[in-house]
Amino acid sequence: MKKGIDGEEARRKRGEVTFELRKKGRDEQLQKRRVRNEVASGPSNSVSDSSPSLSQIPALLQDCASSDPDRQVAGTRGIRKLLSIQENPPIQAVVQSGVIPRLVDFLKAVSNPTLQFEAAWALTNIASGTREQTKAVIDAGAVPYFTHLLLSPSKDVKEQAVWALGNIAGDSAPFRDIVLKTGALRWVMQCCAPGQDGRWVSMALLKNATWALSNMCRGKPSPPFEAVRPAIQCFAYLMTNCQDEDVLVDASWAISYLSDDNSDNNMKIQAVLECGLAPKIVKLLGHPSSRVQTPILRAAGNIVTGTDKQTQEMISHGLLPVLLPMLSSSKRNIRKEACWAISNITAGTPAQIESVIQANIIPSMIHVLSTDEFHVQKESTWALSNITNNGTKKHTHFLVNKGILPPLCDILSCNDPRVVLVTLEGLDNILRLGQEESDDGENRYCDIIEECGGLDKIENLQRHENNEIYEKSVQLIQKYFGSIEEDDEMALAPSESATKFSFGAQSSSAGPGDYNFSFSSQPELSFG
């Protein structure tokens, strides 16, 4: 991989904070879902769903403690109804009642699927609550029983078990790993497999299973890759054969998590590509729904942070033409992610930069740089500056002829030191080329920068508190616009206490953990 601007890797892996695309509320919506009375299905539908009151909890507990199966069902159903009301369900009151271990016992009632279903539903809604409430379900030993219920002959019981595991896995990385250690991932994958007739048993089950699998693949630190790698083929199958928007959204988010690769050898990206996902990702980028475009664009952006060869595979399957319209999307985050993906392509080979130019992307990128919000502009700055660093002289001339210099100079006024340094590097590359090709000693690019007010901005940066910005601005003026007096330079220099800015990719790694994914009886999975 080429080294990029000022010694940093030109291709930028996604940061945990800087590139958070989904807001906290969206994140929580994805992580946990509570089953409400009006949306549930199952064997209880024939019974009136009028909700009991909190004052009835003692009587419901007595029914649950009974040895009479009918009373057990009635008590469990009453608890479930309390937990399924739309506004402020009394989850904590139910937890404090001490009923959770009894509900877990009911998960074992193989001969009474109605009781299993009601108990699983109640526990699912408890696990949709706070971390401590979810932990109470885990501590009662429910997770292995939920995993076992994925083999239930009852579709409703199976669906409820999937939902419960999705809530638990979506709470946090430690809880996700508890679910993975039971071997649940493979059995949830089985719920996504079509029957012998090529049809899914239930779309509701398929949607919940895809969402639960996605939660098993997400979180920081990431799950041990070998524990979740088998799911890639499942998601690839769904992205090819299912048109349901909810399924495509969750499958696409999952691929975005699985392709978020900070490993030295880009093995996660390679695993995604080896499942034939490049053409599927490119196709889904053209989906009419931004709900699908958003996560699949993130997956595409992750893949082009890989090697030149991995990036080229995406280009060869037509990535660039579908990125172009995204630069004018009404969604800011889509424009931003598209620019970020392009910046990682322009960090590649001259041939890849030429592909960007041939796709007519540069005029739109310069328009973004000139007119968009700063968070989008800075990604465009990276993309265009990378061209000056990794492209040919012809490519740099092309940028200048398309009018890059005025908007690039305008970015010098931003408050982000990293972006200012990237911009200064890009200007240095352009000015160097102008100086090399000057026949009469006049650098025509200096004139353009001076005319658009760029020189004034560079001079102002000599007073910047960041040492690297100060030094770089002084260097540019001395090198291309004439030196400044030594006394002036001493007066302009920042104090020794000024912030020192340095480039450098941060990396983190998590231990693989002790996972044992063995099965006494594994289902036959077929995902094409």
Image (cartoon, rainbow, N blue to C red):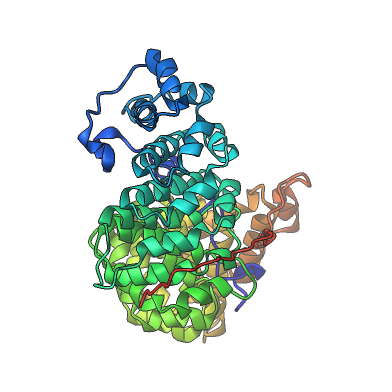
Tell me where residue 493 appears, x and y as whole percent: 72, 51
Residue located at (49% from left, 68% from top): 522
| Figure check: 154 above or below 426 | above
In the image, 459 versus 192, the foreground residue is 192
Residue most extreme to the front = 68
Return the residue nearer the eye: 25 or 419: 25
Is residue 200 depicted above or below 36 in this figure?
Answer: below
The quadrant holding residue 333 is: bottom left
Residue 274 at x, y = what percent?
A: 47, 80
Residue at the image position 45 percent from the left and 61 percent from the top: 187
* Foreground pick, 413 / 82: 82
Confirm whether residue 131 shows in the render. yes
Q: Residue at x 35, y 55 (%)?
A: 153
Q: Is residue 489 above or below residue 127?
A: below
Residue 64 percent coordinates (x, y)? 44, 27
Residue 343 in sight from this viewpoint: no
- The quarter holding residue 328 reads bottom left
**268 left or right of 291?**
right
Q: Quadrant of the C terminus?
A: bottom left
Residue 248: x and y, percent? 32, 61
**Nearer-the-camera pick, 24 or 125:** 125
